[in-house]
Image (cartoon, helix red, strand yellow):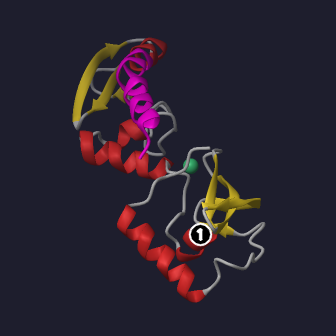
Amino acid sequence: MERPVPAPAAEAALDRGAKLSGYSCKKMDLTGQRFGKLLVLSPADNVGNKTAWHCRCDCGREIVAKTAHLRSGHVKTCGCVAIRERLTLVEGTCVEMLQAKTVRRNNTSGVPGVEWMKGARRWRATICFQGKRRYLGKYVRFEDAVKARKEAEAQFHDAFVERYSKERI
Ligand SMILES: [Zn+2]
């Protein structure tokens, strides 16, 4: 089971804290409780000598998190948010790319990267990658603009996200 790897120093500090306050020995019931994006499903086997829980992230992934990390707020997601933040920080990918699978509210077409150009009376397809907007052309037919965008997405985005998701943080 994959789980986010916290910074070693921070983890050590938290573990020390947990030991001092003593709650690492007792199993308090966190089932059904929510910590950030994580919903506690059921008790898990101890991690080391620390009590832990099966949690489901809002993104659908399930992880095991230590009681102390949940209670301290140290672990709030399965790591999906960290991946997104890292995509932005490391590669300078703009927010649009990270939301490519979701529909943006201010988008005129309902499809990310496809906009209606009033003046030109064309659908313009763009994609934002590594902080740069790339123009994919203007199209008379909406479907053609969407197709151009989807192809570019598949090219850049999917390979990119896949690489980082596999690598994990
Ligand atoms: Zn997640």
CB of residue at label 1: within 8 Å of ligand 1?
A: no
Residue found at the far bottom of this picture: 21
**Closer to us: 59 or 104:** 59
**What residue lies at 39% left-to-right and 35% top-to-bottom?**
164
Q: Position of residue 127 (x, y in %)?
A: 32, 27
Q: Please say whether residue 159 is visible from this viewpoint.
A: yes
State which quarter of the image contains the N terminus: top right
Magenta range is: 150-169
Q: What residue type is labelled 1?
A: Leu
The relative height of residue 5 versus residue 109 in the rendered view (above or below) is below
Q: Residue at x 29, y 32 (%)?
A: 128
Q: In this view, does 56 lie above or below 12?
A: above
Q: Is the magenta stretch mostly helix, strand or loop?
A: helix
Residue bearing the label numbered 1: 70
Give whichever of 158, 141 is nearer the camera. 158
Residue name at image x 52 percent, y 72 percent: 73
